[in-house]
Image (cartoon, rainbow, N blue to C red):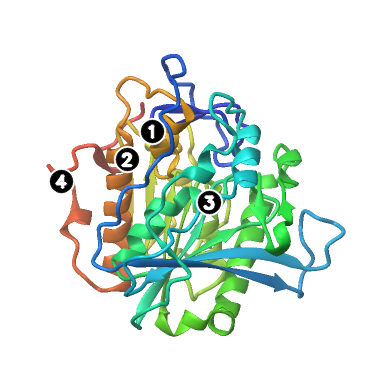
Amino acid sequence: MRQLLAVAAGLVVLAASACSAPAPPRAAVGPSATPTGPATLPAPTGAHPVGTTALYLKDASRPDPWDLDADARELKVTLWYPTERREGQRAPYMTPKESELTLKGSRITGAPYDTLSKTRTNAIEDAEPAGRGFPLVVLSPGFTKPVSTLTSLAEDLASRGYVVAGIDHTYESYATTFPGGRVAECLACDSDTDPGFGTGLVQGRAADVSFVLDRLPSEWDGSGLIDRSRIAMAGQSIGGAAAMAAMVKDPRVRAGIDMDGTTYARIPKSGFTRPFMFIGSPQHVPGGRDTSWDRDWKLLTGWKRWLVLTGSDHQSSTDLPLLAGALGIRPAPGALSAARSAELTRTYVAAFLDRHLKSRRQPLLEGPSPRYPEVTFCPATCGTP
């Protein structure tokens, strides 16, 4: 569904999104502000320094679903991982061209088009990987968004002892840059009102995930860091829906997180026993505007959690709240701050992964915490907004 207004942690960001069957409501916001200059992502909270690199993979076994002239599916995969190197060139957030196409596609006009390319990250570009036996987490972004919009979460997970593989699903975001400077733009953006669009999209993303898991051991020199028996996936919006679709298709994905995405994959009626967690905005309370979680909750027969964050919105789990000042966007009254949104996302995602990939007990996931009063455990204590 083409969504003309997406709210980022109470910050209005014009965007397109295929995340949710019902469009989120418009939030009350103030006038645009003067851009504050380049944004800086918050420092990772774990013990490890973080490195990052990019892989470019080609799946010759299937044609591209969006480019009818391409007989193979090309993907860019960004890896974040533990390293021993603490100094060096920080990785770029986006290229200037990617920033321009993202802002134009999102109809953001109050900041220079190269603004996002000046965002300051924490990971050291092409640093040597260090260690071994780390679990792998696959990340999938929302529709029209590059995986770089999940950088804050990815850097934090890598600092906590995970290898993170973020997939840019080609032609499903405003810009993906390949070697030689070739830029793939959003061919799927013209199809997002077609019947069955969401179902087809998550099926394609699940195939992307399986291909990356197949190829990563042979294509990345640092793959020895990874314990391939411990793999999870998380995603935002349609990327969260893709996490469920990938788990239904590929048993290698042991656990999954959907961050505010309407689900489309059909869970077998016999049930689904692998761990899964929903983290959502208030539109995702039981009986709320999006009922797909109500439907799937009944079919999740293993460990499961359904968390709703007061004051959050569809983009709260992404970097967009952290970038809002640089883009000249004001917060809405009562919205979570950008720093709090990032803290909640990082904390609860890491707790889930530590429990299910590292077998570490997590009292935080057992019920409400006075430290995080914004987090409600559903369905028992949730109501219809």
Decide which of tag 3 and tag 1 comes sooner along the chain. 1
Q: Which mark is residue 141?
A: 3
Label 4 sits on a secondary structure element that is: loop
Instruction: Identify the residue shown where x is 41% and y is 33%.
Output: 313
Decide which of tag 4 and tag 2 comes sooner along the chain. 2
Q: Nearer the viewer, residue 247 or 190?
A: 190
Which residue type does callout 2 highlight? Ser
Decide which of tag 4 and tag 3 comes sooner along the chain. 3
Decide which of tag 4 and tag 1 comes sooner along the chain. 1
Q: Nearer the viewer, residue 344 or 117?
A: 117
Taking 315 as reference, is 233 above or below it?
below
Label 1 sits on a secondary structure element that is: loop
Rendered location of residue 42, percent (x, y) = 32, 48
Distance, label 2 to label 1, CA atoms, is: 7 Å
Mark in the foreground, 4 or 1: 1
Rendered location of residue 46, percent (x, y) = 25, 63
Residue bearing mark 1: 9
Which residue type does callout 4 highlight? Ser
Which residue type does callout 1 highlight? Ala
Instruction: Identify the residue shown where x is 76% and y is 75%.
Output: 61
Distance, label 4 to label 3, CA atoms, is: 28 Å
Label 3 sits on a secondary structure element that is: loop
Few, some or many C-alpha atoms within 10 Å of disc 4 (few <14, some 14-19, many ≥20)? few
Q: With 11 as the anchor, is 96 left or right in this view?
A: right
Residue bearing mark 4: 369
Few, some or many C-alpha atoms within 10 Å of disc 2 (few <14, some 14-19, many ≥20)? many
Q: With 147 as the anchor, is 207 left or right in this view?
A: right
Residue bearing mark 2: 341
Rendered location of residue 383, percent (x, y) = 31, 32
